[in-house]
Image (cartoon, helix red, strand yellow):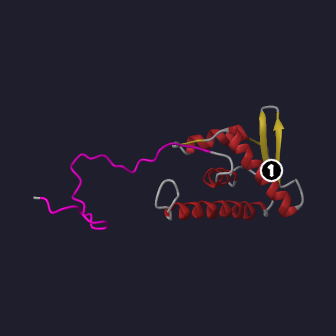
């Protein structure tokens, strides 16, 4: 028996049929330069690498791809985050010793200074990226349409 169309905001759902697969799957994501979601993941790993020794950026890429199986990180994306981190260090501390990005025999490397000022500083860098992520999510939630016309 039909009672007419259901009004907006009045849709009531029935129980899911048995065997219906979970729809909470995430599509794969290709990391992009200047994307705060990508940068946050890279910074999170940079915060945990050994201090005072060069780490190959290719090793960072491999670890990111092994950790985030639904993401694909590339060397250019990780290099861009490393170079931005170096620039931010230069701005904040006016020295180049804290974050050193250079070409090594086996590719580009990053060395983070082994000092007590690095951890709180890199946490602030990650917090800034996390705030940018939250802002993007908030802006997305305000949209009524995929085109952004809402």
At 78% across and 32% down in the image, what residue appears? 106
Q: Is residue 112 left or right of residue 126?
A: right
Residue farthest right in this picture = 95
Residues shaded magenta: 2-31
Task: Residue at 24% x, 45% y: name it.
Answer: 19
The quadrant in which the N terminus is found is: bottom left
User: What residue appears at the point 21 percent right and 49 percent down from the top-left corner?
Assistant: 18
Please say whether residue 106 is visible from this viewpoint.
Answer: yes
Q: How many marks?
A: 1
Q: Position of residue 42 (x, y in %)?
A: 66, 50
Q: Quadrant of residue 108?
A: top right
Residue 113 visible, this orientation: no
- Along the line of sight, which residue is nearer the eye, 128 or 3? 3
Question: Secondary structure under badge 1?
Answer: loop
Q: Is residue 113 above or below residue 66?
A: below
Few, some or many residues within 10 Å of mark 1 (<14, 14–19, 20+): some
Position above or below: 97 against 66: below
Please check the rendered image and state whether residue 64 is part of the magenta-colored stretch, yes or no.
no
Q: Is residue 12 magenta?
A: yes
Residue 112, percent from left and from top = 79, 52
Q: Looking at the image, which residue is at 56% across and 45% down?
A: 67
Q: Whole-percent x and y of residue 85?
A: 77, 54
Give the residue number, with chain letter if any, for mark 1.
52
Horizontal and vertical percent position of residue 120: 73, 65
Q: Main secondary structure of the magenta part?
A: loop
- Residue furthest toward the top? 105
Q: Nearer the viewer, residue 54 or 16?
A: 16
Q: Which residue is more in the foreground, 133 or 90?
A: 133
Question: In the shown orientation, is residue 49 left or right of residue 70?
Answer: right
């Amino acid at each position: 028996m039909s009672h007419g169309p259901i009004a907006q905001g009045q849709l009531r759902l029935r129980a899911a049929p048995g065997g219906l697969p979970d729809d909470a799957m995430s599509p794969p994501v290709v990391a992009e330069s200047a994307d705060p979601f990508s940068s946050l993941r890279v910074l999170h790993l940079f915060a945990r690498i050994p201090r005072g020794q060069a780490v190959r950026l290719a090793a960072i890429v491999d670890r990111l791809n092994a950790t985030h199986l639904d993401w694909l990180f590339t060397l250019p994306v990780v290099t861009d985050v490393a170079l931005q981190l170096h620039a931010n260090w230069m701005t904040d501390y006016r020295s180049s010793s804290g974050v050193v990005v250079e070409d090594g025999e086996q590719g580009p490397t990053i060395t983070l200074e082994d000092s007590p000022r690095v951890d709180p500083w890199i946490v602030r860098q990650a917090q800034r990226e996390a705030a940018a992520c939250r802002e993007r999510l908030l802006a997305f939630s305000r949209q009524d349409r995929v085109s952004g016309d809402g």
